[in-house]
Image (cartoon, grey):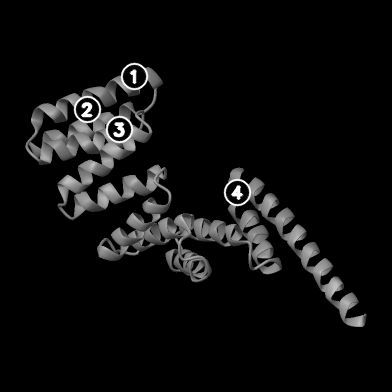
Amino acid sequence: MKRLLFASLLMLLSCGGGDEAIDLYREGMKEFTAGRLPEAENNFLAAADKDRGLLNARLMLSKISYYNGNFSSALSFADSILDEDPDNPAALYWKARSLVMSGEAGGTVVELLVRSLEIDGSNIQAKLLLAMIYEKNSQYREAMKEYLGVIDLEEGIIAARGNLAMLYLRMGLGKKYEQELDRAETIAGASGKGADIIRAFRDEAGRMR
C-alpha cells in the first residue's frame, strides 16, 4: 500500500513539473515572438530543466544561441535533441545551419539537410539552404532542383527566384536568367517588397557578364 501511495505521489509530482514546464515554455515563446531573447532564453532554460523530455524548449535554445552568434551552443542544444530523437527534422536543420555558420559546408551539412527534408519536405528554409550549399559546391543541377522545389512550395519567395536566375546565368542559360528575374521583379512589384533584392541580383549579374 505504501509503495502504491509513493508511486502515485511521484506521478503527481511528475505531472506538476510537466505543467510548469509547459507554462514556462509558453511564456518563453511570448518573449521570443516579442524579440526579448534574454527573457525567452531564461524561460526555455527553466522549462528544459523542469522537463528534460520537452525537446522543443531545447530547440528554442538552439535557435536563440544561433541568433546570438553562439554557434557552438546552438550545436550543443541541437545535438542534445538528436541524442534522444535522431529523426527530429528541426534539430537536424538547426544543426546544419549552425555548422554552416561555423565554416562547414561539406557532406555532413548536406546529409543533415537531406535527412531533415526526407522527414519534413515542407521546410522551405532547409531546401533553400541546401540549394545554396549545392551551388557553392558547384553542384548546379542539384541546386536547381532545390530552388525549383522551394518555388513549388511558395512561388512568391523572391530570394529563391533570384538565386535560381543567377544559377541559370552561371550555367550559361541567359534567356532563363532573364525570364526568372523578370518573374521575381513582377512579384516584388505586386507585393511592394523585394525591389532592393532584385537590384542586387541585377548588379551581381552585371559584374558577371
**For this view, does 56 lie left or right of residue 89?**
right
Residue sitting at the far right: 1
Residue pictured at 43% horizontal, 57% vertical = 94
Residue pictured at 57% horizontal, 62% vertical = 58
Q: CA distance from mark 4 to mark 1?
A: 31 Å
For the residue labelled by badge 3, is the local secondary structure a helix, a strand or a loop?
helix
Q: In the rendered image, which quarter is residue 18 located in?
A: bottom right
Label drawn at residue 189: 1
Which x, y percent locates residue 140? 16, 47
**For this view, does 53 lie left or right of residue 145?**
right
**For this view, does 5 lie left or right of residue 178?**
right
The mark nearer the N terminus, 1 or 3, is 1
Residue pictured at 9% horizontal, 33% vertical = 173
Please, is residue 164 above or below residue 42 in the view? above
For the residue labelled by badge 1, is the local secondary structure a helix, a strand or a loop?
helix
Q: CA distance from mark 1 to mark 2?
A: 12 Å
Residue pictured at 58% horizontal, 61% vertical = 55
10 Å crowding of disc 3: few (<14), some (14-19), many (20+):
some
Label drawn at residue 181: 2
For the residue labelled by badge 2, is the local secondary structure a helix, a strand or a loop?
helix
- Write down the residue under mark 4: 32
Q: Amino acid at mark 3?
A: Ile
User: Which quadrant, please, contains the N terminus?
Assistant: bottom right
Q: Amino acid at mark 2?
A: Leu
